Structures are given as structure tokens and as C-alpha cells.
Amino acid sequence: LLEDRPTNPAAGDDNRPIGYGRIQRKEDPRFVRGKGHYVDDIVLPGMLHGAILRAPVAHARLVSIDTSEALAHPGVHAVITGTDLQALGLAWAPTLSMDVQAVLVTDKVRFQGQEVAFVVADDRYAARDALELIRVDYDLLPPVIDARTALDPGAPVIRDDLEGRTDNHIFDWEAGDATETDAVFAAADVVVSQEIIYPRVHPAPMETCGAVADFDPIDGRLTLYETTQAPHAHRTLFAMVAGIPEHKIRVVSPDIGGGFGNKVGIYPGYILAVVGSIVTGKPVKWVEDRSENLMSTSFARDYIMQGSIAATKDGTILGLRTNVLADHGAFNATAQPTKYPAGFFHIFTGSYDLKAAHCTVTGVYTNKAPGGVAYACSFRVTEAVYLVERMVDILAAKLGMDPAELRLKNFIKPEQFPYANKTGWEYDSGNYEPTMRLSMQMAGYDELRQEQKEKRERGELMGIGISFFTETVGAGPRKHMDILGLGMNDGAELRVHPTGKAVVRISVQSQGQGHETTFAQIVAEELGIPPEDIDVVHGDTDQTPFGLGTYGSRSTPVSGGAVALVARKVREKARFIAAAMLETRPEDLEWEKGRWFVKGDPSIGKTVAEIAMGAHGTVALPEGIDGNLDAEVTYDPPNLTFPFGAYICVVDIDPGTGHVKVRRFIAVDDCGTRINPMIIEGQVHGGLTDGVGMALMEIIEFDTEGNCLGGSFMDYLIPTAMEVPDWETGFTVTPSPHHPIGAKGIGESATVGSPPAIVNAVVDALAPFGITHMDMPCTPARVWEAMQGRPRPP
Ligand code: CDP
């Protein structure tokens, strides 16, 4: 295990800045002073404001729409309807899953909260007031709310806009080997099955979505300030959809108040702001409110999973099987690589060495908001980890085995890496047992079990839950993945100015993860110049190289690799320039701590700053070397990275109210080489808090008519500091063998890994009642209800 090392610039630590402790975040001085610059802070001369009229019902034919009164309202400049967009060919837009989504309703409302009309006015108030003056006639249709009924014969067909469509089926997908899995199950001593639901939840970033569109009719240039996690991909899609040439579009994504997957897709509001600007000839701002965000932007999860696990009676896990019904809402707008309609769900084999595995996933339309984004997760890894970690606990209960012991017995062994799992992944590196043992040691696992035993004797409800997860992050290798045909590679450009200060331009966009700090650290590590001498530019397509954006913990695995490689390219170029300056041959030079020196005579050398000045100066340069110290790369990662971790949660349940208190939470993460331990800790703290939310309180539910019951923070509960414990974090380091600096992603590990640990703890606490499973969220009402009618524990 590595210790976090304290930063000591005086001792020259700046020359090895990766992993050196608690380098403060460069972005924090502006954030803590309230000087962040978000989309809603942007004010352009003559700017107008847009507001969206949303459907009050889930399924209805649009009979008529009368905008005359709204248009006459003081301050209103335009009221745009689906018919107007139809005339422009913009009524429908492609989704990230090759489906189409209505920008404004033309024929039929397909979910409550769907966009019906767009008002542009002098200010936000006038725009909102005018919404109430639009008269719409709807002809109500029966909605499909429960995904289980979506494929029933005679179910209302939601997508009758799609030619030839006679049902609500979207796709069937499978991975693994069904026959092999059947054989393994048939020969097993023990098979247990369980329906496991990962409910619909929402990323709920603090900043909602919004845009300021500024179309200049003179030179046909569109500047679009947007809350987006993927500015370059958005620019390309806008060019394709709106027909504006790509070089005439600039997407700027300023500071982002949290994305978590919510800001990956292109929402109708963004397109409407652009149309509003084209129609009025003025900049148009649209920023949604909280309810709009929760009701209409991308949800996450909504998987109904039938799981089965097979084992020998001594606890060797043999196989895993699952059939999933995936609720995709009214439009298939799920964000994931094209080839994988269920994202990376097929990592559901987890951290275990199985003989066989098979999964099938069926996607269906329902009258709910579209999306299916990877909320702090690499494309359905969260659902996969939840399934396997619940199933392992259910098996442990069946076998009467300790869940830690069962996991330790079945881990993939270190010598098996790189490990080819049964559904097509190649895990790059792993050493699971030390991570698991460290978490148990930090938790005092044996003592906790003893305490639980004593408490159970007194009728107290204490639970200990474990989860051991393996993720697959860093999408991804272009031979395997793309989104709408765009390969998932990232670019990086590095310029070292004549005085040795540098700027690195990256294609990913931070939403609070601290990229301005960590990407500078990578350059600093590679070039031996201090991180504070390196500026990181991101979030502006005019200023940064093309790349696919930030989600699925891909920034470090992909852009982090790009930045390390571009710095190495500069370092190599510096060798040639230094050789010219020293009148020697490049091969006679050796690299150390930010300088090239003559082999055998370290006193003769040139620092990066000296070389930068030389490059821009009058030194005669060798052929093929330009007069600068700049470079650019596009990085195509050879594989994804596979971070992992061991989480232990301790809960106490109040038998009178069913209230679950998370008393302790121990998280040991392994993300390979650690760039900034403080930032990693922050990422883990945030993700664990997400986990408490999903496990105990968050759910977007609908009534039978399709009314969204989670449309405000009064109904959609998210955790605060009151509901979370002091997190106890630890780490191990198993570098990725293929990543240039050995780093794996960390951004989403805790969101992925924590819900099963918490639910496993709740179920463990309730084990004396004979309870073996409970679906999230484990609210007091659900927990209390589960205990009723069952014999009280002794
Ligand atoms: O794509 P996203 O930035 O959300 O996720 P990530 O690549 O896992 O990185 C999250 C933050 O943690 C970034 O600031 C990374 O540079 C940092 N990180 C780190 O310091 N060391 C790692 N091994 C992985 C991430």
C-alpha cells in the first residue's frame, strides 16, 4: 500500500506531483468565493428569455393549440409550436440511441412534462406568464406506465410516429452463453433466484439544465452556451440536426454545477433556445426550473431484473443469469455506446471467477420521460453491480455463509489478470483480496459481527452490508465503441510558452471534478514543471481539441491518457531541441526532473523552460522540428480500465419506525495510480452520498395515469449531511497496465458500489425476520411494512 505523501515543494516534490497528497484545487478560489461562472450568469446585450409549456398529461393526442393570446401578451416576441418546427424540419431530433425525439409535440403527448410550446419574451416572468395564455386541447389516451404491461397484446402503442410500429418493443440484447449457463445451473447444488428492481432515479444536479443561444444572422455563426458534459459531441450533433455548418458553431460549456450524466443528452430546451434566437434575431436564454429538470430530463436506471445464481454447497459460485426488463420511457434516448443497447450491463459477473454467465435485456417504451442516462455510472454498471452484489448476499444467506467469506472464496485471483470474463470483457488488472481485507480490518469486521450477535439477542436491529464491485470505465477503444458514429477518443494539445509556462487544452469538460488541477498534475509529472505553471483549458469547442466528453468516469482513462502522451511528445521534442542547443546528439541525452542532460555529465543540460526559450528563439533546429514546444495527440485507449473496491456499511434500524440509520461506512477504493488523493476522496464522498440517497430515499414514481410523483425536492428526497455518516475511506493501488500513467477512473465508483452495501446491511439487519431481499429505496415505510406480520426476532 502506498501512503498519501505530503506535498513539499521545497523538497522538489513538484517534480513528481502525482499522488503527492493534498494539492489544493485550482478551481476552488473562484468557487468558494461565489465567482464560478455558470450558464445562468451569462448576460448578452439584447438577450431574451424562453420558457417551455409542458404537457400536463402522460398520453394524449394534440387536438389544437391556440397561441394568439400568448403572442399578444406584453413583452412576448415569439411563440413557437411543433407546427412551426415542422416547417423548419426541426420538430424531431435524433436521440443518442438512434431513435428520434419530439422537440415540440406535433401529434401526440407521450409523457407528462413533454415540451409543447416555447415562448420567447423580454424576461423570464413575461415568458412564464404567457405560457398560461396558450390554449391546448388534448384528447386523452390510456397510458402505459408499468413496463411489465408494455408488451401486453392490445397495449396502447406509444410510438405510432414510427413507421410500421405495432407494439412498444425497442430491443432485445444478450451477452454470455445461454447453453453453457443452463448446463452449469443444472449441475449446481444450490440455485437461488430473486427479482431485483433498480428503480427510476434522477441525477438531480444542483444546477438545472440551460442554454444561451446567440445566432448571428450576418455571418451565420451560432454561439451556444450550454450546460453540457460533451461540448464537442453537441456541436457535431447541432451541425447535423440544425444544418448549421460545424465550423460556424461554437459550444461553450462554462462552469457546470454538477452533471452526473444529466447533461450528456441534447434536450429540446437547447434546440428551442437556438430556434428562438434564429427566429427573433436576438440571443435567447432558457434555464429550466427544478421540477422541469426532475420531470422531463434524463432519468437513470429503471431496470427490473430477474436474477439467479448457482453454486456448490461449499460456496463456490458457478454461474449467474439474469433477464432484464428495461423501461426506456417514451423515446429511446439512453446514452451509451451504439453497440451496447444495455450499456455495460454485461459486467454483471462482477469480481468473481464464474464458469458461465448469461444475460438478456429487453427494452420497452412507456409513457414516461426519456433518458436512461448513466447517472454517475459507466453505462449501466450500477445496475450490474447491484444485481451481482445482492445475489451474492442472497446466496450467502441461503448457504448460511458469511458474505465476506463467500466473496473472498470466489474472487478472481491476481494471477488470472488480464481476466477474460464470460460476457466479453477483459479486466485489465486486479488484486481483490488485499482490498477486501483492508476494508474488513478498517471496519473491525469480526468485532462488528460479535456486536451484532449480542444486539440480536437483545432484539436490536443492526446490519452489516458488504459490496465488492468491479467497474468498467473509460469508454473507449474506437474498435469497439462510438456514440452516433463518433469514436470515443479524446484529444489533447499542449503548448509550452517561451518562458516555460504551459497551457494544456483538453476535450473533456469538468462538472466539478477538479480537472483544472489534476490534468495540470499529469503534465507536471511528465514534464517536471510545477502544476501551478500549467493552465488547463476546457469547455469551449473553439479552444479545445475534439473529444467525446465527460461521463462514465472516462476523463482520466481517456483524456488523462491523452494528456500524459501529449506531454511525453513535448518531452521528446524537447530532447531534439536540447540536443541542438547543447550541440550534441539527442540519443546522448538523458531525462530527469524537468531537464535533459548529457549522459555521464549531469551538470550539462537544459531545463524545460530553457528548451522552450530555445525553441522559440534563434537556435538552429534540426530538420523536421518546428520552432515551438507544442504538440497534440488524439488518444485511442487500447482497453477500458477496471477500478474496484470493497465497501462495508453498518446500519441500525429503529423497529418502531423502520428508520434506517447509516452508522458507519467504510470504503476502500482501488483506482490504480492516484493523481490527486484529496480529489479522489471528494469524489468518493460524493458518490457514497449518492448511494445513501438511492438506497434509502430516492425514487421517481408515477401514478396509474402517468403523473410524475417525484417532481420536486419535497417529493424526491436527496440526502443531506444529516443523513450520512463520517465516511471512512482507504485505498489500495493496482495500476492499469495499459494506461499511460496506470490510472483508472474513480468518479463513479462510490455511486456504483455503495447502494448494494447499504441494502445488504438493511437486509442483514432484518434477517431475523426471515427477510432476504428488499427493493430500494428502503424508506422507513417500506422497512416498517416488511417487518409487519412476521414473528419478532427473539
Ligand atoms: O470523467 P470524470 O472526471 O467524471 O471521472 P474520473 O476520470 O474518474 O476523474 C474524477 C476526478 O478524479 C478527476 O479530477 C481525476 O483527475 C481524479 N482522479 C485522480 O486523481 N486519480 C485517479 N486515478 C482517477 C481520477
Image (spheres, helix red, strand yellow):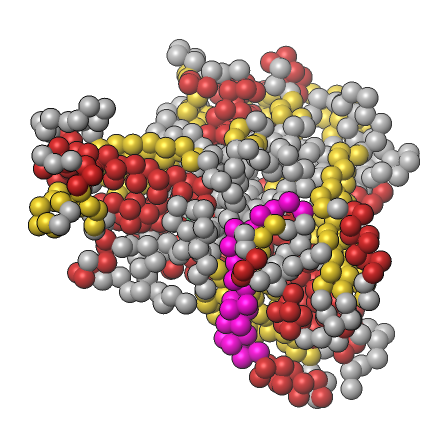
On the image, the x and y values in percent for residue 631 come to 29, 32
On the image, the x and y values in percent for residue 312 come to 77, 67
Whether residue 104 is situated above or below residue 301 in the rendered picture: above
On the image, the x and y values in percent for residue 178 come to 79, 47
Whether residue 671 is situated above or below residue 650 in the rendered picture: above
Report the quarter where the N terminus lies. bottom left
In-image side of 371 versus 25 (left or right): right
User: Which residue occupies 63% across, 56% down?
Assistant: 350
| 432 in the magenta segment | yes
Front position in the image: 751 or 553: 553
Front position in the image: 132 or 684: 684
User: Which residue occupies 49% across, 40% down?
Assistant: 638
User: Which residue occupies 50% across, 72% down?
Assistant: 438
In-image side of 380 versus 585 (left or right): right
| 536 in the magenta segment | no
Whether residue 101 is situated above or below residue 21 in the rendered picture: above
In-image side of 320 versus 183 (left or right): left
Front position in the image: 617 or 573: 573
Magenta stretch, residue numbers: 423-445
In-image side of 740 versus 159 (left or right): left
Front position in the image: 55 or 636: 636
Report the quarter where the C terminus lies. bottom right
On the image, the x and y values in percent for residue 518 come to 35, 49
